[in-house]
Amino acid sequence: MAIGLLCCSTLGLSQGRTDSLYVFEQDRDWISRSILSPIFTTGAETDSYGVLQLNQQYDRGGLRMAQQAYDKRVIGFTAKGFNRLGRFKIGAIFQFNNQQEDSLSNSLRNDLDPLTTYYPYASKSGHYRRQNYILNASVDYRLNRYLSPYIHIDYHKHWTAGTVDPRLKSDRFIVKVKPGIAVHVGNHDAAAFINLGRADETVKVDYINDNFKFSSLYPDRIYYPSYGYGYSGPSRDSATNYKYDTYKGFGVSYQVRLHKLIVQAEYSYEYYHNTNQYYSKSSAQYTGPRAIFNLYNSHAAVNVLFRSSDRAQHTLSLAYGNSNGYDGSLPVTKSLKIVNYRVDERNAGMRYSVQLDKAKTFAKEFGAAVGYGIIDRKDLLSDVQLDAATLRLQVFANLYLRQGIRDTYKLGLSPYIARPGDVNFRYNALATTDFVRNVVNTDYHYYRLQKSGIVFDAEYMTRLFGKNNIGFYGEVDYSWSDKSALDDNFLPAFDPSGQRTDINLGVRMYINAR
Amino acid sequence: MKTNQILILVLAVFFTVASCKKDDVNEARPVDIAVQLTVNEEEVWFDVPYEDAVIKLVNKSNGQTYDVKADTDGKILLHQLVPGIYDINVTLTIPAETYAELTGVNREDDFTLNYTVSSQSFYQNQEITVKLIAAETVGGFVIKQIYYVGSHTKDAALNRDNFIEIYNNTDETLYADSLLIVLAYGKPNKNNDEYSLPNNQFDWSESIGMNVSDDANEDYVYAKGIFMIPSDGTGKKYPVLPGKSFVLAGSALNHAGSYVNNNGVTIGAQKPELTVDLTGADFEAWLLPYEQKLDPEATPFANDVDNVDVPNVEVFFKLSMNDMYFPPQARESFVLMKVDQSFDLNNIAAFATPITRTITDKTTKYPQLPARYIIDAVEIEQYEVSDRIPRRLPLRFDAGATSVLGGPYSSQSIIRKTLKTVNGRRILKDTNNSTNDFGYFTKANPYKGDDSFMD
């Protein structure tokens, strides 16, 4: 109910100087970043923005990582927007989605924290359902000319359920509160916040069929806990795991508005502390965590918007992210202060686009993006390491055709290529578990592939009824790879090469107050 | 006021950042283990081809199995091993022809060296020595099949259909008279205490009142059940022809059909295909006479039904069972033995487990049986490594262990493999290493036909 009221206040009362129909991709990206920010809408032409979206996604194909489903279908609903109400600005993004995944193996866990460890896995492919309710909301209050205190709340409720033995049930919620303050001085705006959050999760693995539960005749039905990136615990170990996690961090953001230039910069840092225990905290048998995982996330981004002339607008985005984590595990090292698993992930990207002839019947956008990512995961006791680098290059072109005042057509085309950089895999024959064979080895083959792809998207925007615009859109992302070079002596769980098709169809309602 | 608010905010940010500081942590390291294979040079005086040894390491924390090889000097270097507790099983089979070349001595059968250690801790770099034990067949009877897991708890017979099959593995007629089938007892869990051996099994030498002069752990087994094939005093009442066997059933009934138990209740299997017909068993265990020796007014247990057409074994001891039940969780091992006249089965020394530090009239004591009487023995274990408990038998009688894959109540049995067939008579594999000697049947087979062998 609270979520609904918040969305209504954000979207339903949208009153502004412009429509919510942002036709151009460049503009959509820019406004989306502003929804929850206390400073990025300062000085903007927009007082309100609201979009409702209903979409269905089909993602299918053999080009995938070890812990990725062959087939995934998502039905999603998104409501997002912001509104100014006197001294208040309220922004919110609400998302609900229902996912169906098929042929997913070696991952009896939710899909929220891919870098963590301490989860069960079984090589049996199964069918999973997942649901997410996500609300990100922000309220800021203009105290005076210079100061705007604000608070940002993230709420996420998730569950995953498997339907094949061994079947997973994961139930998790996350709440983060981010109070902060924004300072406005002339054309300069800056904001800082602290981040405090917690998450609780109950993970259960169960069998319906006793034959699978007790027998060793079906090895793919036996689950093992993954205690690192290769080290596995006893088969069918504890069927229940309670996670109590905390988040701490801070963030800063900055914006400067000049004549034809807007520069936005932001940086955030978050410390995620995950704990795992056999018993819930309310149990008399609770004795503290059996294993922990610490993850340090930092993210920085700079976005520049520049209007070089009446017919050309440029954007440049630079982003860098780093996640660095390590574990501590009583079952592995008898100590929470001795590390067995380490992960280090770094991503850097740059994207440039130019928008031309915005006011004309035919408008265009062209651009290019480059991204470079490195991931390095180690299991020290098992002497397993997989580090991989990937360079991704993408160019894109979007064409917009306006017909009258009601109808707009968009066509987009975007080829890309992802080339593997250094990919190194080390494992020890004396520590080779199913996890190393099925997950690490498969991902190693995936990372070594050169992938190519093309994204084609189209949207038809019109005003069918009332004052709001409707957009019918579709997007197809087709990717393919070269053929894997498999080592017959150490085969992966499956050949991760081939093709993958991701189709996204939906309808959007752009809420206009006028 | 505003200054204070800003100051508070700055301090909050500072403490939040400070609390995100990374902890000081150490990194885990794998270990290097050097293993040296040796033999008792008085028994094995020739050059042993160590490089032919089959060596298995099993990580007890996760069940991962590793096959490693030794060099010609018997050295094995385990580099970057995951620290933990391991079971080690070594088997070195020297073919008869090779044995003759190495020793100049002809022998009919292959020569086998074995070694097993359970729960060996490897938490730091270390060197260990493994002394292989020569496997020599003691007697002509071998345990052919054990059906210890029972069948479906609701649709079949639970563990009422347990049986064990004994086989004459020689080329001459043997007599089953006075053979003992013993359920060997040991620690039923993995608890560690001060009265345990390095492999975590009870250290029976610490039992109160233990007074044997030899090794209480290596030279004896401790029984939870003792059943003897009856005899008429001639020792030749029950001949077993070469290549033939006899079956001892808990209850020699048709568990795949129906029968009336001692409470007058008709018992039948909903899924008869999951269980067996034991009316053809050669012997059965009927516990009432034993119970009545202890208590003359004892009444029969509900399922301890006597099939009068099948001879009963003599029961010398049984504990915690209402019929001759075998624990499906592999908590006991099986021993075939025959004692001589110097050993009084009616007056067997018995001892409490060493963790029992106060002895009363109600203390459970386990009969102690000399290992020198063992003819054959089979160590049973859980298939899941993490569920395994300490082994019970001295290594020289079974250097390995075996299990069914289906787990409790899966209708499966362990079955000794056929080594070869000579003139139509099957000779079963007997290297004193059950890991190598046994396989399993997906359904137990007590009917003694050709399909009751694993060829």
Image: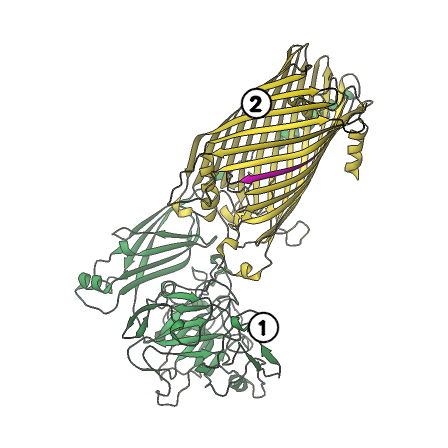
Chain colours: A yellow, B green
Question: Which residue does the image show at 42% across and 54% down from the upper left?
Answer: B58
* Residue found at the very far left of the displayed protein: B104
Q: Quadrant of the C terminus of chain A?
A: top right
Question: Which residue does the image show at 24% across and 61% down from the upper left?
Answer: B41
Q: Is residue A323 left or right of residue B141?
A: right
Answer above or below: position of B140 versus A73.
Answer: below
| Disc 1: host chain | B
In front: B411, or B110? B411
In front: B191, or B194? B191
Q: Position of residue B196 (x, y in %)?
A: 46, 62
Q: Where on the picture, by quarter, is residue B358?
A: bottom right
Q: Secondary structure at mark 2?
A: strand
Disc 1 residue crowd, few under 14, some 14–19, many 20+, Cα 10 Å: some
Q: Where on the picture, by quarter, is residue A181?
A: top right
| Front disc: 1 or 2 | 2
> Any mark on residue B270, and which?
1
Which amino acid lies under the numbered mark 1 shown in the image of this protein? Gln
Q: Secondary structure at mark 1?
A: loop
Answer above or below: position of B430 versus B314.
Answer: above
In front: B162, or A244? B162
Q: Position of residue A102 (x, y in %)?
A: 57, 46
Q: Position of residue B213 (x, y in %)?
A: 37, 72
C-alpha separation, residue under disc 1 versus residue under disc 2:
67 Å
Q: Main secondary structure of the magenta part?
A: strand
In front: B314, or A446? A446
Does residue B124 appear in this view? no
| Disc 2: host chain | A
Which amino acid lies under the numbered mark 2 shown in the image of this protein? Phe
Tell me where the magenta segment starts and ends, as one range.
A54-63
Residue that mark 2 sits on: A396
Q: Position of residue B66 (x, y in %)?
A: 39, 52
